Image (cartoon, rainbow, N blue to C red):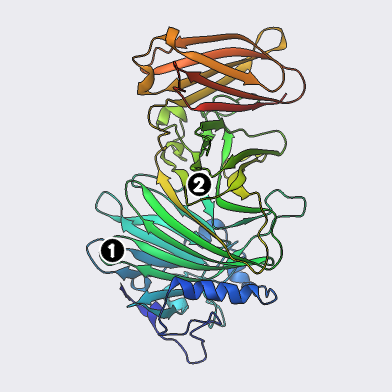
Amino acid sequence: MIAGAGAVLATGAAAQPVDGGFGLSEGDAFSFESVVQRARALADQPFEPLAAELPAQFAELSPGEHAALRANADAVIRSGGPNPILIEPLHRGFIFDKPTALHVVEGGRVRRLLYRSADFNLGAIAPPEEEANFDFSGVRLHADIGGGNEAPFAIIQDASFIQALASGQRFGAVTRMLILRAADRRGEEFPFVRALWIEASPTAGAVTVNALLDSESTAAAIRMTFRPGRTTTADVEMVLFARVELDHIGIGGIAGSYLFGPGDRLGTDDLRAAAYEVEGLAMDNGFGEALWRPLHNPASLRISSFLDHNPRGFGLMQRARTFEAFHDEIRRWELRPSVWVETVGSWGEGSVQLIEIPSDSDTNDNILAYWRPKLPVVPGSPFRVAYRQHWGRAREIRPGRARVTRTRTGAGADERRAFAVDFSGTVLIDISLDRMNPVISASAGTVHGLRLWRHPDGDAVRVTFELEPDGDVSELRLAIWGDRNPLTETWLYQWTP
């Protein structure tokens, strides 16, 4: 049960509706199926965009000014029990213009949260003239995830964006509930959250957020159960109803920033050693391979597809965990979470899509990864999918396999390109080099001087080679094998001039 802690739970003026047209009135029994049915009903109707225009005093806010619009302490909702979850309504403003209706579920029944300007510290900003239906931009969730203090661990806001973290971390990568036509010539479509229904357990230290998504081409119901801690997890279930045939959707989408790293500093004039919140795409595919693709800040848009069948998982990972890897005392990239998507059930055929966008700023989320099903979603039949998100330190790959810890590249001899790839893991400690077999392939060009040697630092082994290019693109694959099985994950790299 959720206990109200202030005016935000007040019933409000009589003119203010309590159901907002979402088919769940004040006091109605709640279930996720009721949100599913509302999504189905929405998809059967023509799309109606939200009236998202903000008063000028809120639309013209800077990011810092908008962040300062915090709810008063007595307007934050606290669940009961020994591990309380705090639910903080977020004010609309800046780029967060779309109104989201907020509800809590108390004793299994719906209660609408009504906007009142008095529940926020607005400073010198004038409140909206009409508060009825002004609503919110989302919620921030707080809990004690280590250290004895309640702190934010998740943010759900605006166009179905989510951020979360584990204990001792800072917010970084962003996930998206649903992606439609990313980097598509037809233009991307951004679903938005019409309403949220929030359930908090007084004993389990968990909170469930139910969302109603809407867009021109689809409506969806999404259920997300967050469990904050040393690793914060979110169990996600989505039921999607298409208004039109959807041939390009993205499931489990993750976005993050990558400006430069140790393997691609060419032309970079920056005193930092690196600047990125995610450094690679990890994949555990349905064919038994563990894959690692280092990220790039490309000169032009780059789209890569990794075909798969029933993947086990994928994620954008931050493996560098020392200050020395970045030397950035302000951004503290080493504290950003990795995000791993663990699939639930059969996902069938499709591909992991990786989109890398040129960027000149470390604040741009220029990296995007998601699962794209092969078959289109058609109207009249619900599309269901489930997965678990893991937010925290870099996930270990399959047991018994070492992982890629560093990729370096530079000029080689005779216009070749030189590479050095480091693998690290306990499996490499007790195996002699003569029992390790580096297996490499290039889709174009010739590999020269393949060499394997033990790195002076602990359990690491380095593979070096040079690529003699032939054409404009070469897809490289590298792994170290033992007598019968791979000892490492497979390193992937797309070389371009």
Q: Nearer the viewer, residue 152 or 1?
A: 1
The residue to which callout 1 is attached is 84
In this rendering, would 217 be left or right of 68?
right
Vertical placement of residue 419 versus 373, above or below: above
Q: Which element is circle 1 on? A: loop
In the picture of the structure, the residue carrying the numbered disc 2 is: 173
Are there few (<14), some (14-19), or many (20+) residues within 10 Å of tag 2? many
- Of the numbered discs in the image, which one, if any, rests on residue 147? none
Q: Position of residue 446 (x, y in %)?
A: 69, 13
Residue kind at label 2, given as amino acid type = Ala
Q: Quadrant of the N terminus?
A: bottom left
Residue shown at the point (37%, 73%) measured from the top left: 75
Q: Is residue 81 visible?
A: yes
How far from the left and from the top, in percent, is residue 93? 56, 66
| 350 over 38 or under it: above or below | above
In the picture, measured across the screen, residue 179 lies left or right of residue 73, that is right
The spot of residue 54 in percent (x, y) is 62, 72
> The residue under label 1 is which amino acid type?
Pro
- 186 lies above or below 60: above
Q: Are marks 1 and 2 in contact (CB under 8 Å)?
A: no
Query: In 3D space, how far apart are the residues under numbered discs 1 and 2 (Cα atoms)?
Result: 25 Å
Residue 70 in view here = no
Residue 369 percent coordinates (x, y): 58, 44
Q: Quadrant of the C terminus?
A: top right
The number of callouts visible is: 2
Specify the farthest residue to the bottom.
14
Q: Is residue 80 left or right of residue 378?
A: left
The residue positioned 53% from the left and 27% from the top of the image is: 490
- The image shows residue 308, relative to residue 121, as above or below, that is above
